[in-house]
Amino acid sequence: MDKLLDIINEILETKGEEKIASLTDEMSLRDHIGLDSLDLAELTAVIEAEFGIDVFESGIVNTIGEVVTKLELTQ
Amino acid sequence: MLTGASKGLGIEIAKSIVENGWNVIAINRSESEELKGLQNKYKEQVRIIQFNLENTSLIKETIFKKELGFKFPIHGLINNAAFAYDDIVTNINLEHLQKMYHVNVFSPFVLTKYVIRNMLMHKIKGSIIHLSSVSVHTGYKGLSMYASTKGALEAFSKNTGREWGQRGIRSNCLVAGFMETGMSSTLDESQKNRIYNRTSMKEPTSKKSVADTIKFLLSDGACSITGQNIFVDSGTI
Ligand SMILES: NC(=O)c1ccc[n+]([C@@H]2O[C@H](COP(=O)([O-])OP(=O)(O)OC[C@H]3O[C@@H](n4cnc5c(N)ncnc54)[C@H](OP(=O)(O)O)[C@@H]3O)[C@@H](O)[C@H]2O)c1
């Protein structure tokens, strides 16, 4: 979870937006965190390099909880 | 990353890139003497990956995972490999057509997918270049199927440029005229002359001119050029 928070904060930082303090499962990547489709592409690429899993490959992922599930499921 | 670097225009592009001090990852089926020679001369700068671009579904696993790894930064992609299945429309052979679409269209799309992801991860304002052909814009008998693969790349490139412009990632097509390479070697002299007569300069397009324009499109000098078709074609009319 910490690693994921770092990754998301890095993306927010390059966008010039405020970092977030912590992640919860219910947080929506788009609505709460404010990532658009291009940001999500970047997130996918970084997560894949880090965890070896393409989280968005098999369908749309909306929340942090869904990302975490995908990463844990295959770990 | 350059596909089809083993011969023809590709080897010319590879030379132009390494002579400029950049590195090249050459993706082709065979390792030609010329490409090996270039690797011997510029050891650190040339990496060859043997891969058959008919196998579109293996691109991610083989090229990006096994060979390079996702952490390897890529600054440019040149989709140059292609082959021309030429025949008149009434003779279309679906199998040949599908094979050509894999090499000329689907693999360039998938390579673009992973190269853009790579650029995003490394925060690189990269440049993507697809090789197109004047046959998209000026019809030739027997080239409808081949030209359609290049038309697909032109449309893909324009929209890719639009989509990724805000991240500084550029996409352009280099629309080449007829060059003297293996691809055009099946044409006889009179066919070639007829093609060259349809150009302002009445001569084949220089591979060096195409390669140098690609080098420019890769460079920072081209940082405001995206979504364009750049014609290097001896002034085809
Ligand atoms: N020649 C012309 O008049 C002309 C005009 C306009 C545009 N173009 C375009 O310019 C580009 C270069 O063409 P060229 O004339 O240099 O052609 P070429 O001499 O036939 O070279 C084609 C290159 O593509 C590679 N290639 C072909 N099939 C492949 C496959 N299945 N997997 C991996 N690599 C493959 C070949 O390498 P291996 O055989 O080692 O795999 C070779 O390096 C092409 O996109 C072509 O459409 C050419």
Image (tube, coloured by chain):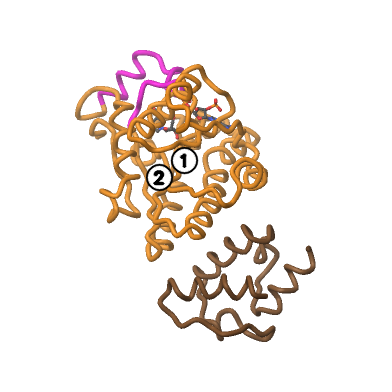
Chain colours: A brown, B orange
Residue at left offset 39%, top offset 50%: B127
Query: Image check: B188 left or right of A49?
Result: left
Is B88 located above or below residue A50 in the figure? Answer: above
| Magenta span of residues | B177-197
Q: Can you identify the residue that label 2 sits on?
A: B129
Q: Is residue B6 magenta?
A: no
Asked if residue B87 shows in the view, the reply is no
Q: Can you identify the residue that label 1 sits on?
A: B79
Query: Image check: B114 left or right of B37?
Result: right
Is A59 located above or below residue B33 in the figure? Answer: below
Q: Chain of mark 1?
A: B
What's under tag 2, amino acid-wise? Ile
Report the quarter where the C terminus of chain B lies: top left
Q: Picture coordinates of residue A48 (x, y %)? A: 63, 60
Residue at left offset 59%, top offset 51%: B70
Ligand 1 is within 8 Å of the C-beta of the residue at disc 1: yes
Q: Secondary structure at mark 2?
A: strand
**Marks 1 and 2 close (CB-CB < 8 Å):** yes
Asked if residue B149 shows in the view, the reply is yes
